[in-house]
Image: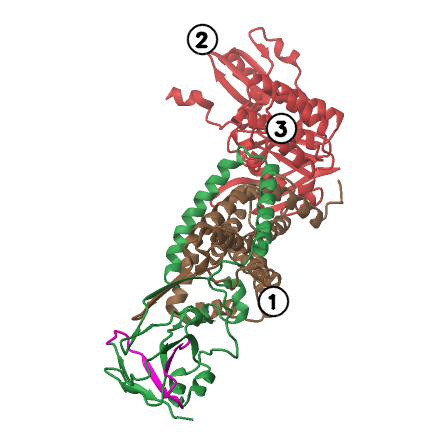
Chain colours: A green, B brown, C red
Amino acid sequence: MSIIGLPIAVAILVVVIMLARKLGTIVVTFMSWRKSAIIAGVYLLGLILSVVIAAVLPNHGFGLMERSHTGGGIQKGNVWTTSYSIRTQKDFESQPGLYLNSRQTFKIDQRAVKLGFAPNPGHFQIYVEQKEADDGKIDVSTYSTPFYVGETDYTKLLQPPKVIFQDGLLVIEPVQQTLTLKLFKSNFTQSQFEGKNAVNLQNGLSSSFGWSEVLLRVPKSMKIDKGQNYLQYLDKD
Amino acid sequence: MSLNNNLLSIASRQYVYKLKANSSGVYSLIFIQVLALLFSLSGIQSMSSVSETLRVNVKYFSADIIISFTFIWIFFMSLRLTSINSKTMDFTLVTNRLSSHLSNIGLLLTTIIFGSISSSLMGFVLKIIMYFAFDRSQIGVNGFYPVFSDILLGIITTGLYMTLIASMGYLLGILIQIHVLFVVLYPAALFGLEKVNPQMLKLSFDFFASETSPLLFAIRIILSSLIVFSLSCLLSNRMEVRK
Amino acid sequence: MTVIQGENLTKSYGKTLALDNLTFQIEENKLTGLIGRNGAGKTTLLKLIAGYLKPSRGEINVFSHNPFDSLQVSANIIFIDNHMAFPTAFSLDDILTEVAHYYQNWNAKLAHGLFDYFSFNPKQRHGSLSKGNQSTFNMIIGLAARCPLTIFDEPTSGMDSAVRKDFYRALLKDYLEYPRTIILSSHLLSEVEDILEDILLLRDGTKCLHQSVLELKEYALGLKGPKQTVLERLKGQEILHTEEFAQGSLYAVIKNQGLTSQQFLKHEDLELLPVSLEDLCIYLTGNAKGGIDHVFKQ
């Protein structure tokens, strides 16, 4: 609830509570205090039971099993600046801001030495590394930069772009994705002591978008027609 | 003439009497908590953002609405305890002003315990409903399972907030008894304060809401409530009843 | 022992003076009737005794304590009027059970006996009772509580005459069985004079008289006869009330100051009439203008 909406909400609530009190006085004329006390007890027991039930419910089926990464793993850090320092595939692997979400290998005809790109709607940062040998294979790895909602990392939920190789053309298509996340927030009476109450309520909502990056590993002698894409060649080791 | 009527024994008799008399309060509490639960099912905060390839809708769920409703409920409960009608009920039987206040505070504390436990636990009913009624693949497991220490902390904090709110409601009730005009004056004073010095309200709000140490928070709330309750007692000490 | 002592008791509501310099005392274990016209200050006095109100001036002591905000006094008093309030959550049955915890002399047998006698429905709520039944129920509580000081403020309002008679009978019986200080305020003196021991008569917030019923019955004499004769005969006497009838006859009430009826009966025209307590109180508290007749004379 925002601070502006609060007075309105309170006003509505006052009316609701008046009604509830009216209800109470009506109910009370045919309920003895003993029955009321029993109902209060049953209500409380029911609530305690709900905690027990919630505790024993199996956890399969949850889509978002990801726990927030604190330290290690993918960090929210400044991926953008570090990605410029990527020089080799090893850098890619060790780059903490990137998450590998697909890896495909396409066999190519030994004689075909040219690689072109299909015009595509998505603009991807494409990195190219030339392999030591002509092994007739193109390795395509797609990575994602971190995707956070609040403090929790949901990068794994992102779908990799679709990569197809046909007729000497590499097609990289972005996948339209809609994510609906239903997340639990601790009650404000609890989160207060985690230091994120009221003062920085809005901060908790910020999210960083995940962007896809594509790494191609191509045979040594392969020629590449980059088309509209900007390619960044990685240094050979 | 009997002499074994000390303050505490009378106050505790009044407390039991009032507990029974006000047991119907549980209906209005259940009513508003269930109502708040229904509101909570649509999430307490939502956010969506869109990029070329990605549309993200995030909804947050918690018992915040349930707890807030319960806060307002306790405010009106404490306000009601100071009404002429309940004063008359007290003074129909054995009482003095102090024993009446003590039993009222006792009743409020009991109500607060009930309210803080129920409002904090109601969040799990929300979670169970979501577990079965919603597409579980969209639900974040994070925070689903109860953690005992968190629940306990939540209940205590909720109870402390409710104590402060109850003391404010009680004071307002007493002020209204002194003069009806306080119905208007009380919010007007707050509004005026806001106009004159906007920082004041925020500071006093932050005084409680931004305290991150549970111990300090508890001390602040307990002291403030004590002050407000004693003020109520003092103000009503010379008031005549059943005029 | 003096249970209630009032010294120069004054209570004003704004500019209206409800009690004016009232000094009185009520002894232990007496059944006192507090009598007065509407607005004489009966209820104000009773509320001062119960500690609900604070005197504007003067002092009141109940069981040698200031009753205002005194738990000690409150525990020994029960104040019965038709403004008593009980929680709506309680049925009549519940109320009898709950109230019992407050009064150590509570007589549950008496309470339930009366409750059944007046055929109350145990499940009914106090608020839904008719006015008369509320008064009856409150009276049951007042009797069963057996408080050292029991105050009934207009206890019979709304009761029908059968219930009123039952109430007075029950009051007297319980009082005899368990003597205590009882104050009964009423404006229907004729109904209560048989059970009262003392009468405290208030007029405009002041004490008009405070005497035992027996003394009060001897207080005045009524004479009826031709106007001239009566006036002549009563020269020098304190006339409390006169009333003219047709054919020049006059009825006069005088204060009985050691006069014997013989002195009057010598005169054959004169007729000696008893003065009922109720009439006496009306004459004593009436305004000097000659009563309602005065209005019609003009």
Is residue A29 located in the magenta-colored stretch of the structure? no
Which residue is situated farthest in the top direction here? C268
Cα gap from disc 1 to disc 3, whole angstroms:
49 Å
**Horizontal and vertical percent position of residue B103:** 63, 49
Q: Which mark is residue C139?
A: 3
Q: Mark 2, chain letter?
A: C
Task: Say what amino acid the circle numbered 1 marks.
Answer: Ile
Determine if marks 1 and 2 fall on one subunit: no
- Residue where numbered disc 2 is placed: C247
Q: Residues within 10 Å of mark 1 (few under 14, many from 20)?
A: few
* Towards the viewer: B15 or C106: B15
Which span of residues is magenta-colored? A119-146
Task: Say what amino acid the circle numbered 2 marks.
Answer: Gln
Q: Is residue C131 left or right of residue C151?
A: left
Q: Mark 1, chain letter?
A: B
Quarter occupied by the C terminus of chain C: top left
Q: Name the element at disc 1.
A: helix
**Horizontal and vertical percent position of residue A47:** 57, 50
